[in-house]
Amino acid sequence: MDNNEVEILLVEDNPYEAELAIRSLKMNNLTNKLKHIDDGEEALEFIFSTGKYANRTTPFNPKLILLDLKLPKVDGLEIIRRLKSLESTSMIPIVVLTSSREEKDIIESYKLGINSYIVKPVKFESFTKAISELGLYWLLLNQHPFEKS
Amino acid sequence: MRELPEIGLQKRFIAWAQWLVWFTMAGSILILLAWQFDIEIIKRPLPDLAAMNPMSALCFFLSAISFQFINYKKSTVPVRRLGYALVILVLIVGLLKMITAGLNTRWQIDNWLFIKQIETDAANNLFVSMAHNTALCFVLMPLSILLMHYRPKSRAAYFQLPAVLFILIAFFSCTGYLYHVPEFRSSLKLLSMAIQTAVQFIFLGLAILFVQPGRGLMATFTNNLSGNIIARVLIPATIIIPVVLGFLRLLLQWWFPISIELGVSILVMATIFVFTALMWHNIKVINTRAIHQSKTELKFKNLLEAAPDAIIITGEDGRIQLINRQAEKMFGYQREEMMGRAIEMLMPERFRSRHPAHRENYFTSPKIRGMGEGLELFGLKKDGTEFYIEISLSPLETPEGTLVSAAIRDITDRKKEEEKFRSLLEAAPDAMIIVDGNGRMQLVNRQAENMFGYQREEMIGREIEILIPERFRSRHPGHRDNYFTSPKIRGMGEGLELFGLKKDGTEFFIEISLSPLETTEGLLVSAAIRDISERKNIEERLKQFNKELEKEVTLKAGELVKNEKRFRGMIENSNDLVVLTDEQFKPFYRSPNFERITGWTLKELDSKDADFFINAHDLPAVQNLQQMLLAHPTKPFSVSFRFKHKLGHEIWMEGVAINLLNDEAIQGIVSNLRDVSERKEAEIKIANSRRIYQTIASNIPGSIILLFDTEHRYILIEGDLMPRLGYSKEELLDKKASEILPTEIYAVTKPRLDRVFKGEYFTTEGRSNGLDLHSRYIPIRNERQEVTLAMLVVIDITELKNSQRSLTDLNANLEQKVEERTRQLEMVNSELEAFTYSVSHDLRAPLRIIDGFADIALTENSSKLDADGIRALDIIKTNAQRMGQLIDDLLNLSRYNRKEITITMVDMNTLVQQVAEEQQLLNKKRITISCDQLIPVRCDGGLLKQVWINLISNAIKYSAKKEHPQIHISSYQNERDIVYYIKDNGTGFDMQFADKLFGVFQRLHKQNEFEGTGVGLALVQRIIVRHAGKIWAEAEPDAGATFYFSLPAE
């Protein structure tokens, strides 16, 4: 898949968690343009087309970032802070997808400007349902500011 | 005897007249009403006979009214005139009827009223017109009323003639009706007066006669002579008896067929019998009266002769009819010479001509006139001498007319007395005034006239107060009354200075003597009044002169006295005692104030030796002094000793003594002493209190008390602290601080002392010689509020300071420890937070992965799995999920534990309703949740919401299996708390496990019965406990459970 066509960026360090999320999205055929990155630093490089992804040219994607908070190197909150502080990236919808239901995290995330905060349910059916619904919502229903429709 | 009216009877006649008139008036009104309403029985009481004409009724009414108007005593002139006008109207009606009847015209006055009824009756051949005799009566009756008050000189009562006439006419008609005279229905129809008309004529006629019972015919009935008595019986009898007997005779004829002759003879017989009986009765009555009268006459004659006064009875003509023996004697005539002659023969020539007129006057209104009333009268004796008489007159009513009885008394002697008294009065040198009980002057003499300037006539009969100046007048009647109640002779000049008032308004001094006079007219007071103006003037001048003289004398004497007084007062009133003694110290003079100051009299002092008075302790000193005095003449020595006061206590004497034995003027030892007890006592008191204060000051442990004067000199040092500070009392006392203190210390002390002398009060603390000292600086003021002394109180507070220091150390330690602990606690807390965070995040993730891949295995590889494999994966999934749930619940619990509480007033009703609705929606089965009005409470709404969520969901969970699950929520308030409770009828539990109810992970039911982690109630308990509340439950297995929790009401 071309890195320039990525629509969903999934940032998740746990490979099994990532697999479960991807499986859930796949059920609704939303995984065609999904990119999974398992550490924070790399995620930033991808978004800002630096380092490993310096050859990336598309400035506006992805259309949605699914972000875990606990990440190696650069954690989720830092990523949000970085993205939201720049005008060019501040408009990318970020959905926090995490096991933490700590109020502290929720409040901090929203303060930084995330678009949604999903606590991953332990029960897989619920998890699948939640992931597919949010994928559908953000990619198909939600109107992206730079998307030509 | 004279014919006199019987007053009572007359009054009765007048009353009857009133009743008769009222009857007439009422009758006439009744008949008019009968005409108006056509009542036959009243119009015509005897059928087919004449009815009373309405015009007649009107005439009666008018006559009756006019009668009342004319005769009513209080009627005014216009009312009387109206009465006469009305009666003239009646007269006109009568005359008109007579004329029209005579002319037989078509228009008749009596057809004027109620013409229709009259025509109807006439058509029925009934007689309704005014009869001719009625018309005649209506002429006669008004005439008599008009004439009623006509009183000609002849005293004839003309009005009675027409009255009697029309009564007779009416009476004739009545008799006619009584005797059923057939002519009234035929030939005499025009004369048929209606029966009511006849009766009313009789009534009104009698009223006219009765209302003036004393006049004309009526006098015959109402007077008091025998003839009148006979008339009263016989005349009515003569009228009534024949009528009655005639009627009886006719009745006999109608009932029994007897001949006219028999009838007439029976009538005659009855008449003779009745009248003879009446006559006989009358004769007896009159005889009895005659006997009684002759007895009275005899008694009268005897009385006359026995009277003490001369009595002469004369007739109206003034001729003497009767005299008694005293009258013969008085006037010197024989009885025969006086009888029948005019009374004027007994009075002096000059009065005779006027007397008949007096007599006639008296007869027109005869009344009793007492003795002595009126004028001075004179009698004339046969021998031509005149004498004073007094006459009392009284009328005597006799059948022969009014006589006058005159009782005559010879008052010549009394008159002479009076004359004598009067001349005495006139001869008196003083003004004399005689006053009666009412204060009216009865008699005054010429001097009184001259003195007051009034004429005698102006004074007699007037009140004595006119002779008194205005300002005394109001009080005088009181004085007068007092005098009259206890009269006694009061001589001239006794009592007050009095003033008289002359007619011309000038006042003058008078002197009055009073003496009571008992007279037949009651008590009189005779006042002798003397004009003392002259005397007063002289007295006044004398007084003035005296006064001036006195003034001068006083002035001169005053100066002398003043000087002496000054001198004497100086010695006697001063507190200095002066004693002069000889060389043996025997006193030969003591100033008199010794008595006042020592209590002893001078005599008592002289009687005892000095040893007795002087305190034994002081004696040696005194004796020593005596030696000194003798040794050193003219040298003053001060002396002081205690002297025994008479009351027992001692007084301090202090003074100076000097030997002046050689001084020619004195020749003695002079001691000038003074009582100084008070001062001495005060001195002693001060010394005592000074000792007390000193003792107190020096005995306060760990302190010094210092006093500085304005120069910062130590003037007092007391207290046990001094040596410890390295100073001694002795080295400091009376030294200036600036001199004795080291410079650096004085540099500190000086400004402080300066502050005190400016009036400041303050304390300082400091260390010196290893001691903590608390110093208090106190300004001490004199009576002018100036600071004259500075007090310094120093207290050793080393021990206090030490303990204070250790306490501060302890506090600092404690704070440090608390800080440390807090830090530790915070660390633990944050560790815990980190822990829960990682639990939240890191524990859940593996569980999700387990569940996720188990699911994937089940869904994507189910075909490869046998039943056991599938079951195993299912169990893995279930437990993974359960663990997830447990973690969530635990996190919840810890979160609520840590969450800060925000207290607001929370409306429990809204909260519970909201939660209940949510919970009901979550449950499939319809469950009734009833809720009472809940008491609002101050709490954290968010946390309480969690409480209610857990409790309500619990209640739903455990009662949902019942057929009719019921949940009830309510609240109540007790003293301190508000208690809420939720009651369900679910599974309940055994109370023996109630203590496990609120423990974490404690469950009373199996997982496959009711799902749950056992955290919900633990969470509820945490929240309630954090609110300082309590939670408890009551339950029974299968009978439901009630969960209570209380929150503080404040």
Image (cartoon, rainbow, N blue to C red):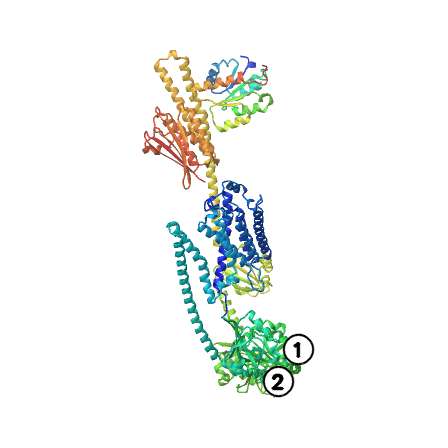
Q: Is residue B771 visible?
A: no
Chain ID, mark 1: B
Choose top left, top right, bottom left or bottom right for residue A84: top right
Q: Identify the secondary structure beneath mark 2.
A: helix
Residue picked out by circle 1: B453
Position of residue B752 relative to residue B573, above or below, is above
Number of the label disc, if any, that sits on residue B427: 2
As drawn, A86 above or below B361: above
| Residue at the (36%, 17%) spot, across then down | B872
For residue B471, the mark is none
Q: Which mark's residue is nearer the viewer, 1 or 2? A: 2
Quarter of image, res B1000: top left
Kind of element beneath mark 1: loop
Q: How far is disc 1 from disc 2 in space, using C-alphas?
A: 18 Å
Subunit ID for the residue under disc 2: B
Residue B89: horizontal and vertical position, in percent? 58, 51
Q: Position of residue B447 (x, y in %)?
A: 64, 81
List x then y, in percent, for residue B816: 48, 42
